[in-house]
Image (cartoon, grey):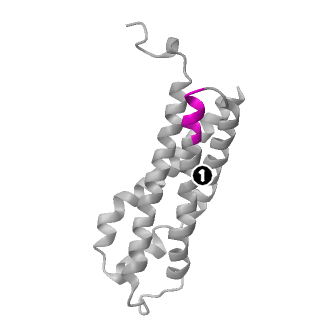
Amino acid sequence: MVLKVVRFFGLLLAALTAGLGFCHALELPGKLALAPADWLTAQHTLYNLFGPTASVSEVGAIVLAWMALVLVRGRQPASLLTLIGAVSLTTALLVWFVVVDPVNLAVATWTADAIPADWEQFRNRWEFGHMGHAVLLIAGFVALVLAVLADTPDRYVWNAKR
């Protein structure tokens, strides 16, 4: 029962976090086309709830993935897939801290009338950092789902009797 609860909430949080990452990925082409002041306005207004939300969902998903790994240890391939999921989610957060967060800290101090000349370097680092973050989050979620499916006995699979 504990494993089911850990997996349910872990998958829920991983899915929500991957959804946030997927949003950033979908916005990439449009954000790259924005003028500097418009890009800055987007940064200062659209993402205010992403940080507080992801700080709970992403950290929670990571903790629960590692807990699930302990609970499925020795059960292959679920154990390996859970390890891949936990490592992917953890790596995604590290990518965010190393690549994206420094840009967030810098951009928070900018104003529309004082955007640095090298703003595109910051923009590209932020946008493509989020793309890498999203890929890792989605990979982690997929691995965790595959772990659950691999751990599900065939008698519970819809078409197992065919």
22 shown above or below 46: above
Type of secondary structure dominating the magenta stretch? helix
Quadrant of the rendered image containing residue 159: top left
Q: Looking at the image, which residue is at 70% across and 32% down? A: 71
Is 78 colored magenta in this rendering? yes
In which quadrant is the C terminus drawn? top left
For this rendering, which residue is in front, 133 or 48? 133
Is 131 colored magenta in this rendering? no
48 shown above or below 62: below
**Label 1 sits on residue:** 57
For this rendering, which residue is in front, 27 or 118? 118
Whole-percent x and y of residue 108? 53, 80
Neighbor class of circle 1 (other Cα within 10 Å; few <14, some 14-19, many 20+) is many
In which quadrant is the N terminus drawn? top right
- Position of 91 with respect to 139 (left or right) is right
- Position of 160 with respect to 3 (left or right) is left
Whole-percent x and y of residue 45? 47, 72
Q: Looking at the image, which residue is at 56% across and 24% down? A: 151
Q: Looking at the image, which residue is at 55% across and 45% down? A: 14
What is the three-letter code of the residue carrying label 1? Answer: Ser
The magenta-colored residue range is 76-83
Residue 75 visible in the snapshot = yes
Quadrant of the rendered image containing residue 105: bottom right
Determine the secondary structure under disc 1.
helix
Outermost residue toward the bottom in this view: 113
